[in-house]
Image (cartoon, grey):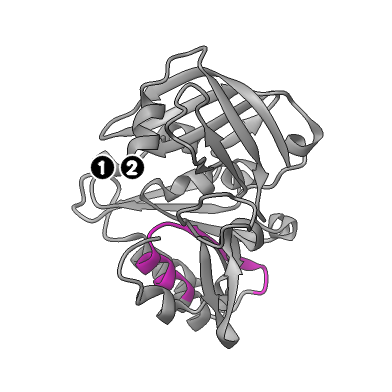
């Protein structure tokens, strides 16, 4: 983990409130050894009224360049969207546990929903050819960074509920079909990030076909280092885990999905 002041190089508006942010950082060992699926906590020093940092999945990082994909959902991300090149950012990271290194030895099916793809892009780039990325959204307007995803080398399978781009259906239905073609293959695994209902279905389908799964959970966080306990989730055996320090990547079988589904609103 490292704390440093980075400098915004690009803050590109994609569409519908989504942005791709590129930040110049010091290329330290902690970044070069970081794992896909880890995240950063970001604060804008110029906005002192925004006391708490905001968490963001690492879309990409290489050679002193940190890239984040984010959506404007509140005051913090709204302020970030207005930041111009040259604006300093206080960055804490890389944080959390990413996808296990041994996953690189398996044939993976990556399943992304909406801007959950931010947590999977780097894994897709690391895996390259031989793996599949199923990317689902309600409409074509909610599919992000398609060209960047194609350049990873993974087989990209876009799917939209209205059929406006790629296959018509859901990412879950495509996963079901793919796993049905290769049930109980020991070299196969699933990695996913997206809305909780999608993740729950991904895990249950993977279990039905005897395939291991890993999920990246998205939660509101205040500290990112396990102090505030604002991001905890219930796991099997009635225990709890901090998403920031013990996640955000978990084995799909570890999470108590019934308890998570009962939450009245995302935390």
Name the residue at 48% across, 21% down: 46
Magenta span contains residue 49: no
Q: Residue 58, position in %: x, y?
A: 57, 40
Q: Residue 192, position in %: x, y?
A: 50, 59
Q: Is residue 222 left or right of residue 137?
A: right
Q: Answer yes or no: do the residues labelled 1 and 2 have beta carbons within 8 Å? A: yes
Q: Can residue 181 be seen from the camera position used here? A: yes
- 221 or 46: which is nearer to us? 46
Q: Is residue 31 left or right of residue 177?
A: right
Which quadrant of the figure contains the C terminus? bottom left
Marks 1 and 2 sit apart, C-alpha to C-alpha, by: 5 Å
Q: Residue 126, position in %: x, y?
A: 65, 43
Which quadrant of the figure contains the N terminus? top right
The numbered dot on residue 140 is 1
Q: Residue 109, position in %: x, y?
A: 53, 59
The numbered dot on residue 143 is 2
């Amino acid at each position: 983990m490292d704390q440093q002041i980075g400098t915004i190089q690009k803050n590109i508006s994609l569409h519908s409130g989504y942005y791709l942010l590129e930040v110049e950082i010091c290329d330290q060992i902690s970044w070069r050894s970081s794992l896909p699926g880890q995240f950063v906590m970001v604060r804008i020093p110029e906005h002192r009224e925004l006391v708490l940092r905001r968490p963001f999945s690492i879309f990409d990082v290489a050679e002193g360049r940190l890239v984040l994909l984010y959506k404007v959902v509140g005051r913090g991300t709204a302020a970030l969207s207005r930041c111009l090149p040259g604006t300093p950012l206080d960055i804490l990271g890389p944080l959390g546990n990413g996808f296990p290194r041994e996953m690189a030895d398996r044939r993976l099916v990556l399943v992304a929903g909406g801007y959950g793809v931010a947590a999977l892009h780097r894994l897709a780039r690391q895996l390259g050819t031989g793996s599949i990325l199923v990317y689902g959204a309600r409409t074509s307007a909610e599919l992000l960074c398609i060209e960047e995803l194609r350049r990873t080398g993974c087989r990209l399978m876009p799917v939209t509920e209205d059929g406006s781009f790629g296959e018509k259906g859901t990412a879950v239905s495509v996963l079901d079909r793919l796993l049905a073609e290769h049930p109980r293959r020991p070299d196969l695994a699933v990695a996913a990030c997206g809305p909780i209902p999608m993740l729950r279905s991904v895990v249950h389908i993977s279990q039905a076909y005897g395939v291991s799964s890993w999920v990246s959970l998205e939660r509101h966080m205040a500290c990112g280092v396990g102090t505030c306990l604002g991001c905890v989730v219930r796991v099997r055996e009635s225990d709890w885990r901090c998403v920031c320090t013990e996640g955000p990547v978990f084995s799909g079988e570890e999470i108590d999905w019934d308890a998570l589904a009962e939450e009245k609103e995302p935390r």
